[in-house]
Amino acid sequence: MVVPTRLPLVRRRCHVCASDRFRASGKFRVNANHKVLDAWLLLLCAACGDTVKLTVLDRVNVRSVRAELLDRLHDNDLGLVADLLQDPVLQRRNRVALDWDDAWRLDTAGSDHLDHEVVDVSVRFAARIPVRPVRLIADGFGLARGEVERLVVEGKVVSAVRLGGKLSGDFTFTFKR
Ligand SMILES: [Zn+2]
């Protein structure tokens, strides 16, 4: 299982210091003007601390917003911060991408698998974290990455998905000694 260990950083250029990483401040700003609502997720530049806003709600009629969502925005709900950061719609609208480096770990279900001849392994993702399968397999089996790449070429590590690039969704593979 691939699980997040902290919130990912947000890739975005800072206009103050030219850093290109922001972290979530954990706060929202909500602005109600008559019946029209705007909401933003606040980010801080990882280098200089300058604040930028990611649009969550843009001139939305207050009656069309679920009360539960409104409460969570007002409460600066951290679960909502995490969900919205990972929301592809929010990312596209604000033209940002996430940086998951050092923000996840691999949880393996024990080490029994290490001495079997043939092992079927299923990898699950607790969040859509782009990771190289070769790296996960290397970590899970205590091998070097180059070794795993060789095993893929030799047909000893087999999967229905391409193991060469990055994946962010569940997949399975078979490992043959
Ligand atoms: Zn900055």
Image (spheres, grey):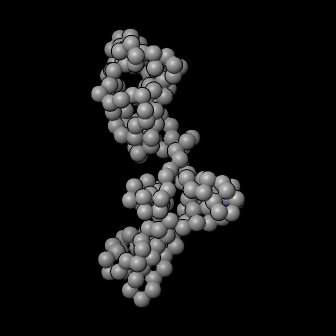
Q: Quadrant of the N terminus?
A: top left
Residue 113 picture quarter: top left
Give x and y (percent) for residue 155.
35, 15
Give x and y (percent) for residue 101.
55, 42
Image point (53%, 47%), residue name: 99
Give x and y (percent) for residue 133.
43, 30
Up/down of 57 relative to 116, above or below: below
Image point (44%, 68%), residue name: 56
Image point (45%, 76%), residue name: 38
Instruction: Answer left or right for 34 relative to 118.
Output: right
Image point (37%, 32%), residue name: 123
- Going by the picture, which residue comes out furthest to the bottom? 34
Quadrant for ligand 1 reads bottom right
Residue 158 picture quarter: top left
Residue 159 picture quarter: top left
Up/down of 111 relative to 130, above or below: above
Looking at the image, can residue 166 be seen?
yes
Give x and y (percent) for residue 17.
70, 59
- Going by the picture, which residue comes out furthest to the left? 160
Looking at the image, can residue 108 be seen?
no
Up/down of 145 relative to 76, above or below: above
Q: Quadrant of the C terminus?
A: top left
Count of numbered circles in the view: 0
